[in-house]
Amino acid sequence: MSEQNVNGWERALSLAVGLAGVGNGIKRGGIGGCLEVAVSLLALKRGLTGDCAMKRALAQASERAESMGSRPSRAGSEELGVPGGAYNLSPRDAVAMTDGASRP
């Protein structure tokens, strides 16, 4: 079993949402109700075990991004004729560039 990555209020909230969702899904019935029960059972499992695979995957991806440098690369933005890189664009500038007009 994996180590717990869900604790305290987050775990209690998962249990509450899971229980409410199962009850609502059963009352609702049909395919939509079955889907609601399935998703709610995942929330219940998360609350009971304290383990969330999605939370673990997001944390690992975040750690990898931080270790590699969290800012996206600016390489090539000057080649596109964007002075200072794409980070300096405003929505107005982007629209002006797509219309073929020069940047003000």
Image (spheres, rainbow, N blue to C red):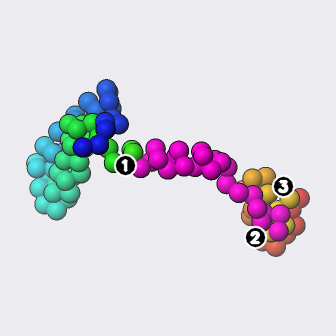
Circle nearer the viewer, 2 or 1 = 1
Residue at point 15% right, 45% down?
A: 22
At label 2, which amino acid type do we have? Thr
Between the C-alphas of marks 3 and 1, the distance is 36 Å
Q: Is residue 96 visible?
A: no
Q: How many labels does the image show?
A: 3
Q: Can you say whether 68 is above or below 96 in the image?
A: above
The outermost residue toward the top is 8
Cβ atoms at labels 2 and 3 below 8 Å apart: no
Q: Residues within 10 Å of mark 3 (few under 14, many from 20)?
A: few
The tag on residue 98 is: 2
The answer to whether residue 3 is visible is yes
Q: Is mark 3 on a helix, strand or loop?
A: loop
How far apart are the alpha carbons under marks 2 and 1?
38 Å
Q: Mark 1 points at which residue?
A: 54
Identified by mark 3, the residue type is Gly
